Image (tube, grey):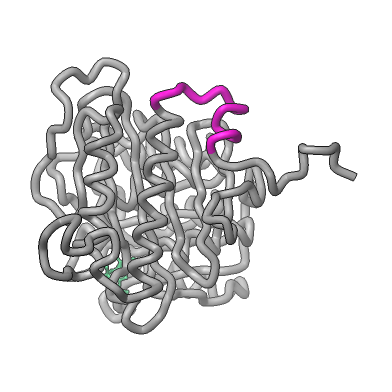
Amino acid sequence: MDKAGKTKFQVDLRRHLREHNVEDNLTHLICEIAEASKYIIHSIRTGDLGVAGTSNLYGEKQLALDVLADRILRKRLDHSRVVANMMSEEMDYIIPVSPDWEGKYSVAFDPLDGSSLVDVNLAVGTIVAIFPGCDILRPGREQVAAMYILYGPRTTLVYSVGDGVHEFGLNSLMEYTLLQEDITLKPKGAIHSPGGLRNLYTPGVETYLHTLEKHGSKLRYSGGFVPDINQVLLKKGGVFFYPHLKDKPDGKLRLLFELNPMAFLIEQAGGAASNGKQPILDIMPQQIHQCSSVFIGSKEEVALAQELIRKHEGATEPSLKKGVAAVTSS
Ligand code: AFP
C-alpha cells in the first residue's frame, strides 16, 4: 500500500523533475512545453483551429493545425525566459530568442509530426530536442533533454534528461501525472515498423525486413513516427525504420527535429538508433532540414540492420566499422 500522499498518481511533471534534481531553468522549460501541448491538444480535439490562436490572440484568421501548433509552441518558448535560440520543423531558419544565453537552452522541435493523420483521426505528436546554450546545429549526443507528447486516445508525455525515460498521462484536471519511470527496452523485440515503399528498398534493407519477418516479428506501422516509437518503447522492444531508399539515399525523416530527440530517448531506454552505418546521435548536422535514414529500437534489431547493410551494400564510409562496433559494444 503506497504511503499517504506518495501515491504514484500525485507525482506531477514539475514534482518529478524536482525529485530528479533537474536544474530550475530546464524544469521550467520542460513544463512550459507541457503547458503548450494542452493548447495543441485542444485544437486537435475540437478541430477549432482558432483555439489559443483565436483571432484575438494572433489577430489572424484560422490556421492549419500544424502551423497553429507551431505558433502555440513558439510563443510559449519565446515567453519562457529560458530559451536562447529555437528552430521549428515548420521554419527554414534558426529563431533567435535571447542574446544573453547564459543558463539558457536552445530548442529544436516538430510541433505536430504526422499532422496529415489528424484528418483520418490517427495519433500524432510533438517532438522536442533540448541543447544547453545557444548552439543547435550540433550532434544529438550533446542534447541535455528530449521529450515527445503523443496525442492519441490518451495524451501522454515522455521525457528524459539523461536519467532514464519516464511516461506521464494528462488527467482530467489537465495535469501530467506519472504513469511509469525508467522505461527499459529488451535487447530484442517482436514488432517492426517499416517506413518507405518496399519496392524502393535496397538489397540490405530488403534482406533485413525479410529476416525480421522470418523471425516472427509482427508488422506495426501507423504512418506516425511518434505513435510508432511510443509502441516500441511501451512494448519494451522492437524496431522502427525509415531507411535510405533507391530514390532517397537519406530516407525521409529529419535529423534535428525527429531523429535526434527520439534517438536520445531510445538510447536512454537501453536501445539503439543508427542510420545503418553509425549512431544517429554521432551525426554532425550539415544543414537545418537534413534527413537521415534511421533504424531505431532494440539493440539486436538495430545491430542486425547494420550488419546486413554492410554485408549487402558494403562499407561506404570509414565510420561504418566504428559505428557497428559502437552500437554492438555499448
Ligand atoms: P507527415 O507529417 O507528412 O504525415 O509525415 C509523417 C512522418 O514524418 C512520420 O511521422 C512518419 O513516420 C513518416 O513521415 C511517414 O512517412 P510515409 O507516409 O512515407 O510512410
Q: Residue at x 50, y 52 (%)?
A: 157
Q: Is residue 99 left or right of residue 10?
A: left
Residue 325 image position (x, y, % from top left)? 46, 37
300 in relation to 129, above or below = below
Residue 33 lies in the magenta stretch: no
Q: Quadrant of residue 317?
A: top left
Q: Is residue 273 visible?
A: yes
Q: Is residue 156 above or below residue 266?
A: below
Residue ID at (46%, 65%): 227
> What percent of the width, then of the height, locates residue 7?
77, 44
Measuring 62% from the left and 75% from the top, which residue is drawn there? 216
**Picture coordinates of residue 135 (x, y %)?**
21, 28
For this rendering, which residue is in front, 305 or 313?
Answer: 305
Magenta region: 14-25
Residue at 61% across / 58% down in the picture? 234
Quadrant of the rendered image containing residue 16? top right
Q: Nearer the viewer, residue 127 or 48?
A: 48
Q: Which residue occupies the extreme bottom position in the image?
A: 120
Q: Nearer the viewer, residue 34 or 160?
A: 34
In the figure, residue 113 lies in which quadrant? bottom left
Q: Which corner quadrant of the figure contains ligand 1?
A: bottom left
What percent of the width, then of the height, locates residue 81?
27, 28
* Any part of residue 278 in sight: no
- State whether the magenta stretch is mostly helix, strand or loop: helix
